Amino acid sequence: MAKPRIGVIGTGAIGGFYGVMLARAGYDVHFLLRSEYEAVKQNGITIDSMVHGELNLNPAQAYDDAAQMPACDWLLVGAKSTSNAALAPLIAKAAAPGARVVLLQNGLGNEDQLRDELPADLHLIGGLCYVCLYRKGPGVVVHQDNGMIDLAYHSGGADAQAQEQIIAEGAAMFREASLRAREQDNLDSARWQKLVWNAPFNGASVVLNAGTHALLANPASRQLIRDLMQEVVDAAEACGHPMPEALADKLLMGTQMIPDYLPSMHQDWQHKRPMELDNLYGEALRRAEQAGRPMPRIAALRDMLQFIQDGYQ
Amino acid sequence: MAKPRIGVIGTGAIGGFYGVMLARAGYDVHFLLRSEYEAVKQNGITIDSMVHGELNLNPAQAYDDAAQMPACDWLLVGAKSTSNAALAPLIAKAAAPGARVVLLQNGLGNEDQLRDELPADLHLIGGLCYVCLYRKGPGVVVHQDNGMIDLAYHSGGADAQAQEQIIAEGAAMFREASLRAREQDNLDSARWQKLVWNAPFNGASVVLNAGTHALLANPASRQLIRDLMQEVVDAAEACGHPMPEALADKLLMGTQMIPDYLPSMHQDWQHKRPMELDNLYGEALRRAEQAGRPMPRIAALRDMLQFIQDGYQ
C-alpha cells in the first residue's frame, strides 16, 4: 500500500517542521505557502534542529495556490487559529475525498469553528504539538526540543472503530518520522490539558517580556505561572475533564528541563501579529464560567493582552 | 492661640505640596530633605499647579538633619512606605511632646509598622491623600488635580473624645489651606477604600505602561481595572469594612474626570525605585486571605510587579 499523500496548509514553524520530518520519512509532502513561497521555491525548507541537526528539504513541493495542489489524503493545518475563517476553502481545495484534516493549533474550540465550513466527508482531527520551535526567517525554522504530537478525532462521520483506526494511522505516520505520537480518545480533554501549559506561559511571556527560564527562576513569577496553571486545571475538571495528578507541578518541572523558550504568542507580539486570545483564553473562560469555575487570574491576563494588542502601532 | 508648627518629614511630591499649601495659609512649616536639600535651600519649593497656578515658597525652611528642626506640633510624613524603618528616629527628633504624626502614605498596615518604634506620647494619624501630582525635578512638584485629605486616628492614647478633637483640628488646618479634608472615624476602612483605587491603577499602570486615560479608554483594561477594584471591595467588606455602594463604578467615572495621570508606582518603576508592593498589595492580600475572600487578580498583579522589580538592572 502506497504511503498517503500529505498536504501542509499554512507552512509556518509548526507546518514546516512536521512536513519536513514526514518528507524525510518518505512521505509525499506538499506545502502551501503565501509570503514565503519564493524563498522556499528557491532554497527549500530548513529545520535548524538542536535535536536532529540541520535538515534541509530541497526541492520542497511548494505551492502558492491550493488549487494547484494534488489531492491529499492527510492535511496538516499549521496556520494560526486567528486565520481560521480563511482556511476552510483552502482545505477543501487540497483535500482528497474522505481526507483526514489535522488542526495543529493551540486553544479550545478551533475544530468547532471550522467544522461547518468543511465538506461533510472530511474527517476533522485535533493535533496537539508538544514542540519548541520558532520561525527564524523565510523557510527557516529553529527546532529547540521535543516534537511529540497528540491526535484525537473530532468529527466527520466515522464510527468509534473507524475513528480509532484513523487516529492509529495518523499516529503511526508521525512515529515513522521519528516523532512520539499519542492516540487520545477525547479531544477536549487533550486540548484542556495542553492549555494548562499554554495559557499561562504564552500570556506571561508577553506581559512580562520573558522566556520560560526567567519566569521559572523568579519566585513571584513561578508562583504566578503555577496559580494560573491551577486555575486551568480546576476549570478543566469542572468541565468534566479530569487532569493528571499534580499536573501543574509536573509541567513546571518539565519546563525547566527544556531549553529556554519564548512561546508562540511572544513571537506574535514581537512581530505585532494578532495573538490567539480567543482560542487560548476566550473560549476557555466562557466554558469555565458556564461550569461555575471562573478563572479570574486568566481573565486578568487576557485583558492585559487585549490592551497590549489593541495598542499595536 | 498661635498656629501649630508643622514639620514635613520626607519632602517629596506629597510632602512638598501639602507643606507649601499650609505655609501659604500662614503656618510655620519646616521641611526635612535629603538629596534635594541644596536645591531647595537655593530656590525654595515650587508647586506647578494646574489648579492654583505656580506657587513658589522661597525661602523654604529646609533642613537636612532632623536634629536641627524645631519641635513641631504636627508632623506630616511624606516619605514612601518602603523607607518606613528609617523614619521613626527622624520623627522622634522633630516631634514636640504629644505631637500629632500624620502618615501620608498609601496602603495598609503602615501605622502598625511604625507604632512600636515611636515614643508612646506621639499621636499617630493616618492621612489619605486624594491628589494627582508628581515630582518634576529637585524642589519642583507638578500638581494636576485635587488635594483632598482624609484623616483618621490610629494610636497614641487619646480617648474617643480627644481623638475626635485631634482629627477635627487637623482637618481644620488643611481646610485653612484651601484643601478639602474629611474626618474619618475608622482608619482601616478609610485605607481600604483608598486601596480600591490605588491597588488596580498603580499596578496596571506599570504592567501595561499606561496612564489612567489609556487604561479607561480600552474596554479590556477598563474591565480589568473594574474587576480588580471589585476584588478589593469584596475583600474590604469581608474584613468588616462596608464600602460605599457601586464604589468601583463611581471611581471609574471620577477618574475619567481628572487629567490623565501616571500613579506613583509608575514613577517609582520608571526611576527603578522599589515599588510599594507590600503596603499596597501584600498586607491586603494577607488580610483578604484570612477573611476567606482571597483576591486572585490582585495576587497575579502583585506577582507580575515583583518579577518586574526583581529584574531592575
Image: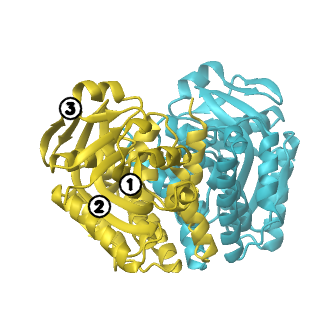
Chain colours: A yellow, B cyan
Q: Amino acid at mark 3?
A: Pro
Percent from the top left, x then y, of residue B235? 66, 71
**In screen coordinates, is B212 left or right of B249?**
left
Q: Which mark is residue B100?
A: none
Picture residue at 41% right of the left edge, 43% below the top: A266
Q: Secondary structure at mark 1?
A: loop
Foreground disc of the pair 3, 1: 3
Picture residue at 61% right of the left edge, 66% below the top: A286
Task: Tell me the residue that label 3 is attached to.
Answer: A59
Percent from the top left, x then y, of residue A200? 43, 58
Percent from the top left, x then y, of residue B123? 68, 61
Q: Looking at the image, do the residues carrying marks 1 and 2 touch, with CB atoms under 8 Å apart?
A: yes
Specify the subunit that label 3 lies on: A
Picture residue at 67% right of the left edge, 67% below the top: B156
Q: Circle 3: is it few (<14), some (14-19), or many (20+) Cα within 10 Å?
A: few
Task: Tell me the residue that label 1 is attached to.
Answer: A104
Specify the subunit that label 2 lies on: A
Indicate which disc, 1 or 2, sits on the residue closer to the N terminus: 1
Task: Tell me the residue that label 2 is attached to.
Answer: A149
Q: Secondary structure at mark 2?
A: strand
